[in-house]
Amino acid sequence: MWPLELYTMIAGPTLGSVAAVSGHGGALEMYRSLEPPIRAGIQFFGTLLLVVVVLGLLQSHGTRAVTKSRRSPIISLCIGLPGLLVVGAVAGAGIFISDTSVGPFFAVPMVILGATVLPVVTAIGFTAIGRTLASRLGSDRLWVGIFVGAVVSGLAGLALPATVAVAGVAGALGLGATARITFGGIGAGRPDERTIPPANKI
C-alpha cells in the first residue's frame, strides 16, 4: 500500500496546481477581469521568458523546429492542428478525471503530457511567427524574432479571443514543425545517404 499512498500524495498537489492554472478556482475569471493593457504586459513578458527558457534548453532542436515551420508553415499547420487538438484533449481529460477515485493514476501522466508539450511547442511557434514578421522588416536574427513573437503575444492579450486564436496558431505551428523534425529523420534524409545500385556506380 505504500507506493499507492505515495503516488496519491504526490498526485494530489500536482493536479491541484495544474487545475488552478487551467481555470479552476476562478483563476481564468480573474485573468479575464484584468485590464487589457495589464493582460498584454503579462503575456508579453510571460511569452518572452518562456521562449528564452525553451530555446535555451532545446537549442539545436528548437532552432531547427523554428526553421522548419518557417519554410513550410502550411504543412506544419496541417500536421500540428490535429496533434494540438489531441494533446489538448488528453490534458483536458486528465484534469476532468482528476476528481474521481481512480483519477490520479490516469490523470497525472495525461496532465504532465499537456503541461510539458503545449508550452514548448507554443514557444517555438511564437518564435517562428516573430522571425517571419521580422524578416519582412529586414531583420532575420533569432533574438529579433523572439522579441517580435513576444510582442505579437502581448498585442493578442488585448482581447481574449485573439489570445486563444494566436496561441492556437503558434501551438499548431510549433507542434507540426517539432513532429516533422522528430519523425522526419527516419530513413535516408539526405540524397547522399541513398544506396546506389552497383550497376549504376561509376
Image: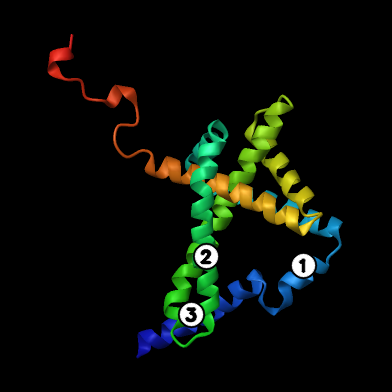
Mark positioned earlier in the residue sequence (2 or 3): 3
Neighbour tally class for label 1: few under 14, some 14-19, many 20 plus, Cα within 10 Å: some
- Where 7 sits versus 92, above or below? below
Give the residue drawn at x 30%, y 32%: 188
* Residue matched to label 3: 10
Query: Residue 158: where, in percent of width, then height?
Result: 81, 54
Disc marking residue 89: 2
Return the residue found at the far left: 199
Query: Residue 72: where, in percent of width, then height?
Result: 53, 33
Return the residue found at the far bottom: 1
Quadrant of the image for the N terminus?
bottom left
Along the line of sight, the residue nearer the viewer: 77 or 95:
77
Neighbour tally class for label 3: few under 14, some 14-19, many 20 plus, Cα within 10 Å: few
Give the CA separation, mark 2 to mark 3. 23 Å
* Tag 1: amino acid: Tyr
Neighbour tally class for label 2: few under 14, some 14-19, many 20 plus, Cα within 10 Å: some
